[in-house]
Structure formats: C-alpha cells, structure tokens
Amino acid sequence: MIQPPGSDRPSAAIGPDRWDQAHQRLVATLRGLIRIPSVNPPDPPGPELEAARRIRDWLAASGIPSTIYEPAPGRGSVVARLRGDGSGGEPLLLLSHLDVVPAPPDRWTQGPFSGAIVDGYVYGRGAVDMKDLVAMEVEVFRLLAEEAAADGRDPATEPIPGLRRDLLLAVTADEEAGGLDGAGWLVDHHPEHLLAAGALNESGAVSLDIGGRRLYPIQVAEKGYAVYRITVHGTWGHGSMPRPDNAAVLAAEAIKRLSAPGAPRVTDVMRDFFNGAAEALGGDAATLLRAIADGDADRAEAAIDRLCAPVYARAARALVRDTISPNIVHAGVKYNVIPGEATMELDCRLLPGTDEAAMRAEVIDRLGPDLASVCDIELVTAAPAIVAPADAPLYRVLEQAVRDHDPDGIPLPVMAPFSTDNKSLARLGVPAYGFSPLKLDPGEAYLERYHGVDERVGLDALRWGLPVLYDAVRRFCG
Ligand SMILES: [Zn+2]
C-alpha cells in the first residue's frame, strides 16, 4: 500500500480529539499571555515575571517542574526540562521570549492586550512576536508530559517515552531590548539551561505565498548589528547669519550620504534561498530570482520590484547588503541659535562576513574626509551575524516536519534581517533555527504584523503549526 506523505509522522499517533483539545488549550494559553501587557521597556517592571509565573503554573498542571529566574526586579524568565533516556546525545532547546514592544492603541480595531478572537484570528500585541510560539512550545511540553503520565511515569523525574535526548524550555524576558535581563543573563549565569545540540526560536517556517507556490523559509542565519552614536561638530552662532558649518546642516548631509543603499553582497545563505525559490517556482519568477542571486545591482533592483510586495522588497534589499538606518537625530537648543553640535544614532545591520570594524570603516568612508573630520564616532552596542548549518540533522528534521504537513510546501533556508536571542546562544556555540511553523491564509501580510497595528495570528495557522512543532521535537529527540 502506498502511504500518504507524512503518514509515519509521530503526531499521527495522537487522535484528532486530543489534537483538538491541545489546540483549544494552546489558544487559551496564547490569549492568557496576550492579556499580560509584558511591554519592554517595562513601566513598572512586573508583567514579564507575572507571565513567567503563569507559564510555571501551566507546566505544573501537567506535572512539569520549572524554575523562574529574576535577575532584576519583575524581569522573569522561566526554564524547564523534560528527560530523555540519555542515549540520543545533547538536548534540544525550545527558546522563546515573553516581552513585547509597546502598542499605542490608536488605529487598532481590537484592544492590543485583549486577546480578542475576530473572524478566526487572535488579536493582540505578541500574537506573532512571539507569544504564539511561546504557547506552542508550552503545549508541546504539556503533551509530552501527559503522554508520560498516561504511561505511568512521573514527567518530573522519569524519561518521556520515546525521547532519547532531553528537551529544554527557556522562555525569557527582555528580548526586545537585547536580552541582557533574559537570555543574555542566562548564558552568563545559568548556561546549563541552554546548552543543547540545537535550538528552535522565533520567526521561521511561516508560509510565504509567491508565484502560486507556498514557501516555508526556515531561518538559519541572522544579521548582526552595530549601533553608533555620532557627534557632529559645527560652530555655534546667531541664527540671523546662517553658516555652512551649522551642525544641523552638516548632520543632514551626513545622513544623506550614510542612508544611500550600499552595493549588494549576496551571501551563501541568501544565494541558496533565491536559487532554491527559483527552482521551485520556475518561469518568469525564476528568472527574476536568479537575477537577485547573481548580485548584479541594477538587475537585482528591478527584479525585486517586479517580484515582491513592498514589505518583502524591503526585506530582500536588506538581506543582500549591510544597511545603515539613521534613527535618532538631535540638534539645536533655541530657534535663533545656530547649533554647534548635533548627535545621531545609526542602526547598522551586518551581513555574515562583515564585522564591526568593517562596518565602522564603511561609515567613515561614506561620510567622506570632510565630514569624518568633524564627527566623533562612538560604538553603543554590537553583535555579530550568526549562521547555523543548513546541512545539519536538525535542519533536515525541520524540513521534513514541514513537508509532512504540507506536501506541496517548499522549505528553504533563509536569513533574518533582524537579530533575536539566538545571538546569545551563539556565545555558547548552540546553533539556532527560526521555527515557528504557521500555514497562513494567502495574502496575509505577516511581516507587517511584526510590531505593527492589529497584530494577529490565524486560528487555522496555529492548528496547523502545533503538530508540526511536535513532530520536529519528537523526530529530533527520538
Ligand atoms: Zn521576537
């Protein structure tokens, strides 16, 4: 008999009623988390700790002990472990974060901390970044623990049936501000909760409809960053007699030079992504994608415009170059005083292969000798780009889990233009993959939901994703 694709998947051993219960509980977990306004920066601190305690209680209800760390008052992260029999190697880590960015409620059609369900979507800040995956990871933990209990084992102390390696959970505070009070702190003080053969974290394996096909970009790499504070020195004076070395005028020219897009550089990860997508799509789209992969600046620009909706075009452009975005600018003390000093902060994002020193050299080069000579450049913070292998067993498991649940879907390795807590894991040498599997309605502008208005996630997308994550965990740990 010919088996349908994915019929040997571990999730097939669980009946539809059980999956339905798990889905309902996942949605309740997500809504419960959305209703805790764990905004970062917290004012006052506390909601992250409250969310960590809520997760501790949910885990405890399924017999799973957990530990909460509070490196600063009100900043809570929660960790837990399920045991394998130890014969399968290093653990797998499920990582996620509890905090969210602020959500000014104007223009939202539902309260950003309501968790309202409207037309099949759960609304609220964190619905996609990333309380959805927190809820999925917690649910996978609960399912496994309950399977152990049904088998007469205590999931707090005994191995989960079928697991050969341990499964770790770390749900952290402070990701949206760099993770110093969350994943970064755990790396420095309790790395034993994070040391693993590999980790799964936010923002990959979300379906992307393009050219009539469904791609699932799985994040294997993240750009790094370098933030610079630049002080521009001009000459103070009386506003009635304009002067060319007005620091605001110099800063404006500096911004113009810095913000012009640089030359493209197609890294191995993105070349594989564009070529893989070209192979899958064929036709005109393939020609355009290969033009982007080739890295010829003019042809690539035209191809991106023809191929992509604006938000994806911005992402594509950012993924083939080091970028500089001047995001804070200050000058002036009074309307009739020419400012002698201006400050700006540059958000620079680095491709693999560009280090902080190279980025600084690029900034100086773009300023030119005339402006560089009147600027002080100070590094505020930096983190290198990271790349996890796409030819590794864990990545293969992720691909297979997606294909099992969407035989027409095309998983592809991709880079993220932003940075996550994975940068902290990289300090421990733990390779991390973006894997928050969701099969979206075609046309759902997922990327615009990140930090956006009316952030929301589809119930059907969650229903599809939970068994995908379950299978990935069971296959890698089994
Ligand atoms: Zn996030």
Image (cartoon, rainbow, N blue to C red):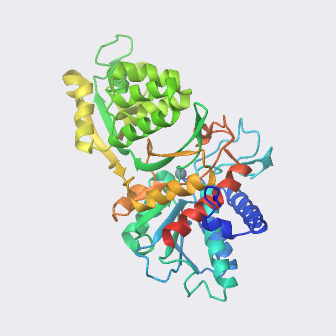
Q: Name the residue located 40 percent from the left edge and 47 percent from the top edge.
A: 222
Quarter of the figure with the N terminus: bottom right
Is 134 displayed left or right of 95 in the figure? right
Residue 417: quarter of image: top left
Q: Residue 233: image x %, image y %?
A: 27, 28
Is 150 displayed left or right of 75 in the figure? right
Q: Name the residue located 42 percent from the left edge and 28 percent from the top edge.
A: 333
Residue 378: quarter of image: top left
- Against 155, is 424 above or below? above
- Against 290, is 466 above or below? below
Q: Residue 309: image x %, image y %?
A: 56, 27
- Against 79, is 373 above or below? above
The reply to whether residue 257 is in sight is yes
Is 366 displayed left or right of 330 in the figure? left
The reply to whether residue 47 is in sight is no
Q: Residue 94: image x %, image y %?
A: 52, 65
Q: Name the residue located 67 percent from the left edge and 75 percent from the top edge.
A: 57
